[in-house]
Image (spheres, helix red, strand yellow):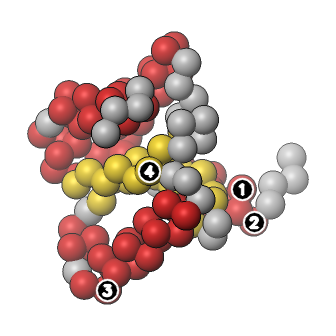
């Protein structure tokens, strides 16, 4: 199989998911039975999205502590603006939210997938 550089990088990222990403993915992949096709570490516009449902234009990001520093926060704002211009809604959750409140995180995601704000 001949993968593009983006495809190779996406595969590397899928194989190196953080613990909170693995936890969330274990729940997100079950949504396929409900008709939601969630992809992980998908490339789009030069970015790799933690999780995305292209049909619902929803991006789900799981952020660690590095996203709290000013430089990374600015990078995230720019990235979110690029994705918004492409018609995507971005949901961001902290690692600890996924670890400690997975049901609440999933509720927010399901509401967004079903069109609620």
Q: Marks 4 and 1: in contact by CB < 8 Å?
A: no
Q: Which residue is mark 1?
A: 7
- Label of residue 99 in the image: none
Q: Marks 2 and 1: in contact by CB < 8 Å?
A: yes
Circle 3 SS class: helix
Residue extending furthest toward the right: 2
Lower position in the chain sequence, tag 3 or tag 4? 3
> x and y percent of residue 9 in the render?
64, 62
* Mark 1 → mark 4, Cα distance in angstroms: 23 Å
Pick whichever, 57 or 98, lies toward us. Answer: 57
**Position of 78 relative to 15 (above/below):** below
Camera-side mark, 3 or 1: 3
* Mark 2 → mark 4, Cα distance in angstroms: 26 Å
**Position of 88 relative to 22 (above/below):** below
> x and y percent of residue 87 in the render?
55, 53
Look at 37% across and 73% down and name the residue there. Answer: 77
* Mark 3 → mark 2, Cα distance in angstroms: 26 Å
Pick whichever, 106 or 4, lies toward us. Answer: 106
Q: Which residue is mark 2?
A: 5
Circle 4 SS class: strand
Look at 87% across and 53% down and name the residue there. Answer: 2
Lower position in the chain sequence, tag 2 or tag 4? 2
Lower position in the chain sequence, tag 1 or tag 4? 1
- Looking at the image, residue 97 sits to the left or right of residue 115; the answer is left
Q: Which residue is mark 3?
A: 71
- Label of residue 89 in the image: 4
- Tell me if mark 2 has few (under 14), some (14-19) or many (20+) residues whose alpha carbon lies within 10 angstroms of its own: few
Camera-side mark, 1 or 4: 4
Which corner quadrant holds the C terminus? top left
> x and y percent of residue 64 in the render?
26, 62
């Amino acid at each position: 199989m001949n993968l593009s550089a983006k495809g190779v990088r996406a595969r590397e990222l899928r194989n190196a998911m953080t613990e909170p990403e693995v936890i969330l993915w274990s729940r997100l992949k079950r949504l396929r039975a409900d008709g939601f096709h969630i992809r992980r570490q998908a490339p789009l516009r030069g970015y790799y999205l933690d999780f995305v449902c292209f049909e619902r234009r929803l991006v789900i990001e799981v952020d660690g502590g590095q996203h709290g520093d000013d430089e990374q926060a600015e990078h995230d704002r720019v990235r979110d603006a690029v994705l918004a211009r492409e018609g995507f809604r971005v949901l961001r959750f902290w690692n600890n939210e996924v670890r400690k409140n997975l049901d609440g995180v999933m509720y927010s995601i399901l509401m967004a997938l079903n069109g609620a704000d």
